[in-house]
């Protein structure tokens, strides 16, 4: 598979994974709201249990908003051109692992290979940002060689 098609497939997989995160958060918010509404019918409005449920709902709502923002980031990456150096949107192949610099989604599989979607906010990105094919870097005491960037 050529690099452009591989990158498109990686983005598609990440979008699917992020959509699952969004749907899970949305369902959890709805479930908590439903529980709080049911609880409201049987208890006092200032009941600590209901307050706890609503606090949890608000926390999930902020996570839901973050998930939506992350999805927008991934959608923007579909139109970005590849660069010869590591930056947001890059697929980075090293002798240790394969990474996609986008959002922090963690481990996923694409074309029978394991990749890691990492955020540009993680310390590793600070080390690899700007590196090119053939460069080496040290992270956690290990020497790592960049085999490809696209």
Image (tube, rainbow, N blue to C red):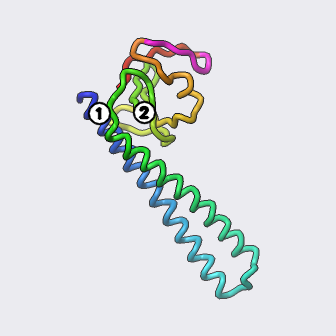
Query: Is residue 115 covered in magenta?
Result: no
Above or below residue 48? Residue 65 is above
Whether residue 127 sits left or right of residue 48 in the image: it is left
Question: Does residue 60 lie above or below 133 as drawn?
Answer: below
Give the alpha-carbon distance from disc 1 to disc 2, as whole Å. 11 Å
Residue 150 image position (x, y, % from top left): 35, 26
Residue 55: give x, y in percent of width and height.
67, 66
Q: Is residue 17 above or below residue 31?
A: above
Task: Name which residue lies at 35% across and 38% down.
Answer: 10
* Residue 92, x across and y down, in percent: 41, 25
Magenta span has 137? yes
Disc 1 and disc 2 in contact, CB within 8 angstroms: no
Tell me which label, 1 or 2, sits earlier in the chain: 1
SS type, badge 1: helix
Q: Determine the secondary structure under disc 2.
A: strand
Report crowding for label 1: few under 14, some 14 to 19, many 20 or more residues within 10 A (C-alpha). Answer: some
| Residue appearing at x 71%, y 85% in the figure | 43
Q: Residues within 10 Å of mark 2 (few under 14, many from 20)?
A: many
Which residue of the protein is positioned furthest toward the bottom in this rendering? 41
Q: How many marks?
A: 2
Q: Which residues are magenta?
A: 135-141
Toward which corner of the image does residue 139 lie, by quadrant? top right
Counting from the top left corner in percent of width and height, residue 5 is at 25, 34
Task: Say which residue label 2 marks.
Answer: 100
Asked if 99 appears above or below 61 in the picture, the reply is above
Residue at figure coordinates x 38%, y 23% from the top left: 149
Name the residue beneath numbered marker 1: 6
Q: Quadrant of the N terminus?
A: top left
């Amino acid at each position: 598979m050529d690099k452009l098609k591989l990158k498109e497939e990686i983005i598609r997989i990440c979008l699917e994974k992020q959509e699952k995160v969004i749907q899970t958060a949305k369902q959890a918010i709805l479930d908590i709201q439903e529980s709080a509404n049911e609880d409201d019918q049987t208890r006092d409005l200032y009941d600590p249990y209901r307050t706890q449920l609503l606090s949890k709902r608000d926390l999930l709502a902020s996570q839901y908003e973050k998930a939506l923002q992350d999805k927008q980031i991934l959608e923007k990456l579909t139109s970005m051109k590849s660069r010869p150096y590591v930056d947001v949107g890059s697929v980075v192949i090293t002798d240790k692992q394969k990474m996609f610099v986008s959002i922090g989604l963690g481990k996923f599989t694409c074309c029978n290979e394991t990749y890691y979607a990492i955020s540009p906010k993680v310390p590793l990105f600070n080390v690899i940002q700007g590196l090119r094919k053939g460069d080496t870097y040290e992270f956690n005491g290990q020497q790592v060689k960049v085999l490809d960037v696209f």
